[in-house]
Amino acid sequence: MRRTMPLFSMGIVEKLTGLTARQIRYYEENELIHPERTAGNRRVFSFNDVDRLLDIKSLLDEGVNLAGIRRVLSKKPLKENQPVKVGKPLSDEELMKYLRSELVNAGKFGKTSLIQGELSRFFR
């Protein structure tokens, strides 16, 4: 469920994937991704959306055209439907504690965080 939570703005997704905003909008127009929208109609992406965009980029790098990408992705199950093999799941409190530490430590000791701005909206 947390992988489907919309967290990332277009700018963050551009940095994470190396794709341009125009490319990302094009893949949305062709229904390869389905980001959520805010009340102000801005796109907000989940971890699953970012993974899918990275899959698209990888296929493009291999020379696959849009029709081929659509076909490959239609056969690939979404990450949210796959069983996740992890240890003990984090409680909401543990997750918030982890995210807070990521926000506080961003920029310290040369550690950079692409999601620093995104995390700040969860804490006052």
Image: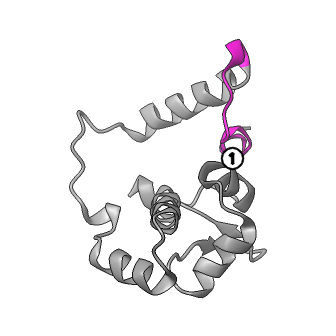
Residue 123 seen anywhere in this rendered image of the structure: no
Q: Residue furthest top?
A: 109
Seen from the viewer's position, the closer of residues 84 and 30 is 30
Give the SS element for disc 1.
Answer: helix
As drawn, which residue projects farthest toward the right? 40
Q: Is residue 104 left or right of residue 5?
A: right
Q: Residue at x 27, y 65 (%)?
A: 81
- Residue 119 in picture, x, y percent from top left: 66, 42
Number of numbered discs visible in the structure rendering: 1
Q: Is residue 45 left or right of residue 4?
A: right
Residue 113 magenta: yes
Q: List the residue tagged with mark 1.
A: 118
* Label 1, residues with CA under 10 Å away: few <14, some 14-19, many ≥20: some
The quadrant of the image that shows the N terminus is bottom left
Q: Give the residue displayed 56% in from the left and 87% down from the top.
A: 30
Judging depth in this view, the residue of 28 and 57 nearest the camera is 57
**For the residue marked with disc 1, what is the amino acid?**
Glu
Pick the residue in front: 36 or 94.
36
Instruction: Give the answer, above or below, for where 83 lies relative to 41.
Output: above
Image: magenta residue range: 108-123
Quadrant of the rendered structure where residue 17 is? bottom right
Residue 25, horizontal then vertical, whole percent:
68, 77
